[in-house]
Each structure stands twice: as structure tokens, then as C-alpha cells.
Amino acid sequence: MPTEALTNPPPSRHGICDCHVHVFDDPETFPFENAPAYAPPYSPASALLTNAAQAGVSHMVLVQPTPYGRNLDVLRTSLVKLGARARGVAVADTSIDIDALAALRGEGIAGLRFVENLLADGRRMPGTVPLDALLQTLAPKLLEVGMHAEIWAPLSVTLERWPALEGSRIPIVLDHMGGFDPQLGLHHAHFQRLLELLRDGAVWVKLALCRRAAGIGYDAIRPFHDAMIEANGDRLLWATDFPFVRLAGTPPTVKELLGLFEIWVQDSELKERILLRNPVERYGFEASLAGY
């Protein structure tokens, strides 16, 4: 999905947080919990650091990949290796208790992920936990230990469940720009409702372009991106989705995506807020990341 804007990105600044990346390590050492729905790349924490350094990214949020399911060994090991530079988002089912959640939080895991995206054949993606688990069992536990829920779902599904999500009183982070359908257009009721939630400060949204731009290019996504920026920069998190699994065509680089963000967002204070300050607030990074 190359665009002219991606060919010569401006130089990026250090001290930036990528709020959505994945680590895949040697399956002999870190076995998958379930058969992967895609071919997992070899992308250990060292590769993550190399790509981040090339872009000027110093901090990152590691999101548990679906092939590992509830097996958090690679996530926890990677968090130890990366130390203060990383936080995590894990997967857990309804059997987890308060003490175990509190222990995960102490290891740098800030939230749990819930998924409502299905495979092409209609099956639930292996290694995912549905929203029902959050709403029926896990929400009070997350609230007690101070963790958030991260949701990867079509926007229509999130909005259908929004009254219950809002009633849980836990922070909600939406993956992949909230999962809106760009084919429905900027003025569709679903996207406009997402903007309302942003304006109200009711939800956090990750500005990860790749899933929304698939097949149509980044330029087609810019109006949606601009509308989110205008709605509420205090609730936006910049993210890449490195190493871009299940993405057709030639994947972008972290540096290219950061360069595109810095072209699209010209206001320096707003850039700093999204790239540095918001991750400190949402994920509990050291305040020095944002220059506090």
C-alpha cells in the first residue's frame, strides 16, 4: 500500500511509544497454545528493538499474539528483557483470579485483550477471548486491580455492546482505529458515534492504520484519521501493529508509519501528546518518557 507520503518520511524524534506491537519467538522454546490461523514470523524482542531504534521509537506496548493464547511465557519474558521500555496487554479467560491479575499488573501488563473478529469461515479466531467473558465475569476483576480492556472488534459490534462496556467503568482501548468500515464513509452513523465517544473521553483509540488501509491505501484513511485527531487528541495512541502479520502485499516499516503520522499531524504539542504523554497515562510508563 505505498503512497507518495511514505517514500520520504521526515526524520522522527526519539522518546516515542509504539502502542501496538507483537513478539514471536522460537516455538521450540515458546510453544503456541493453539494452531495459528496464520504463519507466525520469527520476530523476537531483539528484532522489535532493532526496528524501533531505526525509527526513533524507544518504548512499546506488547500485545499478546493469538497463537500463544493464554500462554503468556513469551510476553512475560519479553517484558523482563525490555524492562522500563515496555508494557504488555495479555489474554486471560474467566478462570483467572484477582491475585493472578494483580501479579500480571506488577509485571507490567496493563490490560487484557478481547476479540470479536471471526475467520473467513465464521469460526472464532483461536487463542482469543470474547467480549462476553469481559462483561459477564472479568470486568469487576479488572476494575479492582486497575487494568483496562483492549477490544479488537468491528465497530458495529463494539457499539452494540457499548452500554454494557460503559457500565463496566473500566477504561476501554479500541484496536486498529476502532475497527470502522471505511467503505461506509466518514459520515456513517457508526463512525460518527465513535467520534462522539472520543469527544466525551469515554474511549481510547489506537491510530494503527494498516488494518483499515488494507486494499484501499493510506490516503483513503486520512479523513478518518483527521476526524479522530480533531475529536480528542487526549484519547489517541499511536501504533503500528509490527510485524504486520496477515497483511497482504509489502508491509510498511515502523519508520514509514511514524513519518506518515508526522506529515498528517503538524501541531508539535499534539504530536507529543499522542506519541509520548498519552502512553504514560494509559499504560503507566515512567513519566520521564513524556518529559514530565
Image (spheres, grey):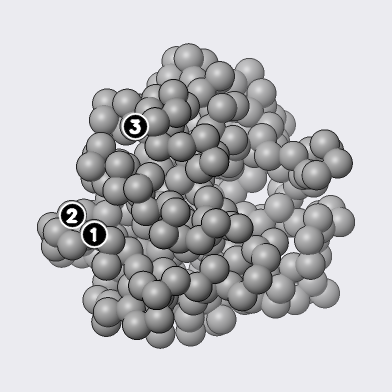
Quadrant in which residue 43 is drawn: bottom right
Q: Which mark is residue 265?
A: 1
Q: What separation in Å lies between label 2 and label 3 (alpha carbons)?
A: 17 Å
- Identify the residue shown where x is 71% and y is 53%: 66
For disc 2, the marked residue is: 270
Q: Is residue 147 visible?
A: no
Amino acid type indicated by mark 2: Leu
Q: Are marks 2 and 3 in contact (CB under 8 Å)?
A: no
Amino acid type indicated by mark 3: Leu
Q: Is disc 2 placed on a helix, strand or loop?
A: helix
Q: Are marks 2 and 1 in contact (CB under 8 Å)?
A: yes
- Identify the residue shown where x is 50% and y is 73%: 2
Q: Is residue 209 visible?
A: yes
**Foreground disc of the pair 2, 1:** 1
Left or right of 78 on screen, residue 61: left
Disc 1 packing (10 Å; few <14; some 14–19; many ≥20): some
What is the quadrant of the C terminus in the image?
bottom left
- Identify the residue shown where x is 71% and y is 73%: 41
For disc 3, the marked residue is: 195
